[in-house]
Amino acid sequence: MNKLYFKYLSLLPIYILLQVLVLNQVLFSEYINPFLYILLIISFPLKTPKWFLLVYAFLLGFFIDLFSSSLGFHSTASVLIAFLKPLISKITIPYNILGEMDKISLQKIGAKAYITFSLLLILIHNSCLFALEHCNFNFTILSKVISSSIITLIIILITQLFMWQKK
Amino acid sequence: MYNLLRFIKLNQFLLLFLLIEGGSVFLLLQNNSYQANAVIKFSTQYTSFIHNHTTAFSDYIALKKTNNYLIEENAKLHSILKHEESFHDSILIKNKTFSYQSAKIINNSINKRNNFITLNKGTKHGIKEGIGVVTHNGVIGIIHSVSENYSIVISLLHRKSSVGIKMKKNNHNGILKWEGFDYTTANITNFPNHLLINKGDTIITNNHSIVFPEGINIGSIADFEKDEEGYYNVKVSLFEDFNQLNFVYVIHSTEAAEQQKLEMKITDE
């Protein structure tokens, strides 16, 4: 368990820097802003202590907020998905397919389950984030949520392919 | 006690979530004025509805006082009217750029560091953000946010409010701020100490502001002392009793936009 904490905490700065220095700077279109850091929250093993998940999500969001010099947006959204993750994993990931300490990955749980699982979390995260940012929810924001979610999903899937382990 | 502990243990995940999420939202509202404003705007609709009903009662009790106030004001307006007539053909004196609209206060506070006032007029009545609120004997504040039927005023009794003022007798300009605690006095800190000032000198608004018209009475000098940096530290006792406010005037400035546009050109360059 300690190994897990250590591993995820050391991944934290890498993903934060990747997010704020690369992905936030590349303006694909005004409707698209991919958030790769969600991958960290998605990939936590099923048996991770829930408190660690929440605190970790808060730290993650908080640092990303600091770099975009507006506090509270990302941390609210990522704490929300960290809270909903156990619930969503129960309904989307097939029973007994994963060991307790296995990371949730494309390779382990298969494309269908992985895509539904991560897309749900990404959609919740993005709708929460954009709704907070605009203090409103209408069709333009919905289209922003959907386009960003799809791009985020694609980037996450690509990252997953890089992590493919040969048997 | 044991039950409470058991409850906390059972719901620890949910409680921790609420704690952290609450912390995030707190950060969000603390640091992002647009979001905080939207929350205030939304909640005003409902809180004002309640305040509106409670003031209906207190209004009845204050009828006598309101009557006196109106009589006083009538008298004052009559005298101004006479004064204006005598300057009838002088274009310079006539100030037609401001128009007044009455509004009623339905919620007011004086005991915080940052006080806000709620008025019963909103966008429906043509009130916009950033316009001034006065009474016949003082500046009250500036409109901060507006909903359909109500609006919130940043009171003069607020950390961030500052009003451009001058002395009536020698037109020396300064800035009036409120330093907390006592709602009957405010402070001026930028009068250089070579000026001759006396206790009882009247302070009025100056003509630099696009929000307030010139010459509204604000207060009189109650006390002053020299500080080491070459300025007076002046205490002004306000004419208006913020604790007894009931009716106010919202000032629409017809030429504010034009003046602002012109002045923006300077800051742009």
Image (cartoon, grey):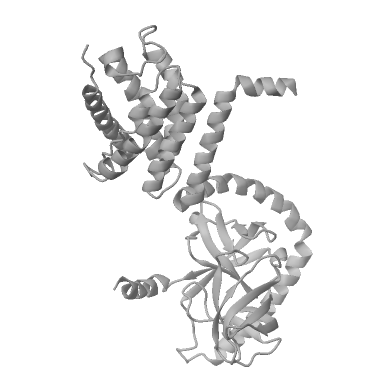
Q: Residue furthest top?
A: A96
- B97 versus B23 height, above or below: below
Q: Quadrant of residue B257?
A: bottom left
In percent of width and height, residue B12 lies at 59, 24
Is residue A51 visible in this depiction of the protein?
A: yes
Q: Residue B258's quadrant in the figure? A: bottom left
Q: Residue B45's x, y, as percent? A: 56, 47
Pick the front one: A151 or B183:
A151
Q: How many marks?
A: 0
Where residue A105 appears, as percent x and y from the top left, is 31, 19
Residue at (33%, 23%) from the top-left corner? A118
Q: Position of residue B204 (x, y in %)?
A: 59, 81
Give the residue drawn at x 56%, y 29%.
Answer: B16
Nearest the eye: B265 or B230: B230
What is the quadrant of the C terminus of chain A in the image? top left
Give the vertical position of A129 relative to B129 (above or below). above
Q: Is residue B216 visible?
A: no
**Left or right side of B70 for A75:** left
Front position in the image: A165 or A159 = A165
Towards the viewer: B262 or A81: A81
Of the 4 image quadrants, the one containing the N terminus of chain A is: top left
Rendered position, B177 above or below B234: above
